[in-house]
Amino acid sequence: MQIAIDVNGRLGDAESASVPVLDRGFLFGEGVYETLRTYNQRPFLLDRHLARLRASAERIALEPPLDDPTFTARILATMQAVDGPGERSIRLLLTRGAGELGYGLANCPPPTVVVIVRPHAETPAGVVATGIGIVQSSVLRNHPQSLHPRIKSNNLLNNALAMQEALRAGAAEALMCNHRGELAECAQSNFFLVRDGAALTPPVEAGILEGVTRNFVFEVGASAGIPVREETLLPADLATADELFVTSTTREVLAVTRVDRRPVGDGRPGPVTRALSEAFRRLARQRCTS
């Protein structure tokens, strides 16, 4: 099958897999998720993704019903059901489960666990070579006292509205500010700005989701001899940036060469971004060889 989906231990495909209409993940967005990919057909940084899934679940008082070895076994079994060679994209979803209507946590049903595996779509070489365009979104990132951005929630309306704005403008990503007017993160990725040879990214305190790929870039920078650090960034910093790039599971390290249709630097991926991108791919494949 092209897409394999495991729902609570029952394997199916895109047509047969289902969750009940009364699942609170569907009704209220009460759930958390992770997205990861493989290199050399092995899940990359799975332990870190599972740790973040548990941390997100804890913030909404949701107890995962599987331990890490069982999660891993279920992921691997679902991977084996996908036809063809190549790498895989994996999405893990954990919801409150199906029960009575209402918000109370008493007598909660067992959580729903979903594993979705499909062939991984690499970023086209042409996009890597030219970079992507982004827009500064009018949509603010969730206030931490509203829905904390460190919860990787199934409720993605904040991100979806920002991305819809970007797509209407012909851009590939939406850069959001926080409630203080600082740069935070993009709708589908973390954000970096290069200045004087150093890669700078907003701190966790800016109200961002602490990306697994983002954090790995700190290790990649150390390996490549490129300083990578957190720093508070403002919209005005975009105009003076030497380079910009985004990071995510699916995009890895990808140059941003246009902001609101204006070129960044000379309008091409810069040397720091290229070096980090190449080092990232090399180290990721090395991590997945044993």
Image (cartoon, helix red, strand yellow):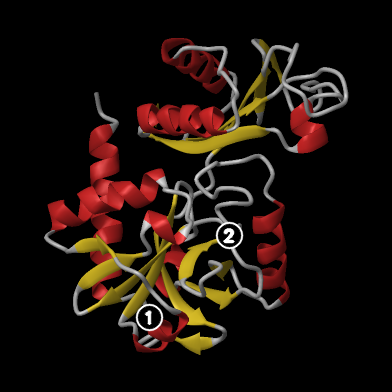
Tell me, for residue 107, which label it has, or none: none
| Residue furthest left as drawn | 225
Along the polypeptide, which appears first: circle 2 or circle 1?
A: 2
At 82% from the left edge and 17% from the top edge, which residue is drawn? Answer: 99
Q: Position of residue 244 (x, y in %)?
A: 38, 73
Q: How many marks?
A: 2
Residue 198's place in the image compared with 284, above or below, is below
Q: Which residue is mark 1?
A: 268
- Looking at the rendered image, the disc whose residue lies closer to the viewer, 2 or 1, is 2
Q: Quadrant of residue 68?
A: top left
* Residue 118, position as x, y percentages in the image: 59, 33
User: Which secondary structure, mark 1?
Assistant: loop
- The quarter in which the N terminus is drawn is top right
Residue drawn 36% across the image and 59% down it: 203
Is residue 191 placed above or below 14 in the rendered structure? Answer: below
Quadrant location of the C terminus in the rendered image: top left
Horizontal relation, residue 30 to residue 148: left or right:
right
Q: Residue at x 67, y 49 (%)?
A: 156
Say which of 158 and 171 sits in front.
158
Asked if residue 60 can be seen in this view, the reply is yes
Q: In x, y percent, where is residue 34?
A: 53, 36
> What residue is drawn where x is 66% and y is 30%?
3
Q: Position of residue 172 (x, y in %)?
A: 59, 68
Which image quadrant for residue 45?
A: top left
Check disc 2 and report the residue beneath it.
Answer: 187
